[in-house]
Image (tube, rainbow, N blue to C red):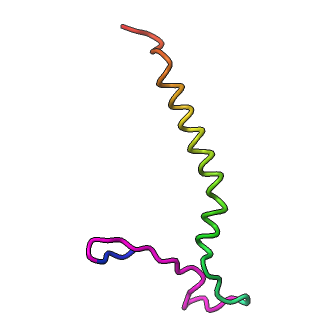
């Protein structure tokens, strides 16, 4: 991430490594984006479960009132 005049920019540089060299298949553009997309459904499901858990906890009255 770089800071350009107060604004942030994110650049996908996966697949480029001067230390490792090119793979047999060559450069794979947007690999990080594809990996993130493949995990998106699982992450959203976990967020939904956590949200439902907190909603139930907030609806329950305290177990002992003083």
47, above or below 21, in the image: above
Residue drawn 52% across and 81% down?
13
Q: Position of residue 21 (x, y in %)?
A: 61, 92
Quarter of the rendering containing residue 7: bottom left
Q: Residue furthest right?
A: 24
Could you tell me how many numbered marks the image carries? Answer: 0
Q: Is residue 30 magenta?
A: no
Q: For the magenta stretch, what is the residue range?
A: 5-23
What type of secondary structure mainly makes up the magenta span? Answer: loop
31, above or below 44, in the image: below
Q: Is residue 18 magenta?
A: yes
Q: Position of residue 28 (x, y in %)?
A: 65, 83
Residue drawn 49% across and 21% down?
59
Q: Position of residue 41 (x, y in %)?
A: 65, 53
Question: Is 38 or 24 nearer to us in this picture?
Answer: 38
Residue drawn 47% across and 15% down?
61
């Amino acid at each position: 991430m770089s800071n350009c005049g107060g604004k942030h920019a994110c650049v996908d540089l996966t697949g480029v490594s001067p230390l490792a060299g090119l793979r047999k298949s060559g450069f794979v553009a947007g690999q990080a984006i594809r990996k993130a997309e493949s995990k998106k459904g699982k992450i959203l499901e976990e967020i939904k479960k956590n949200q439902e858990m907190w909603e139930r906890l907030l609806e329950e009255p305290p177990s002992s009132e003083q």
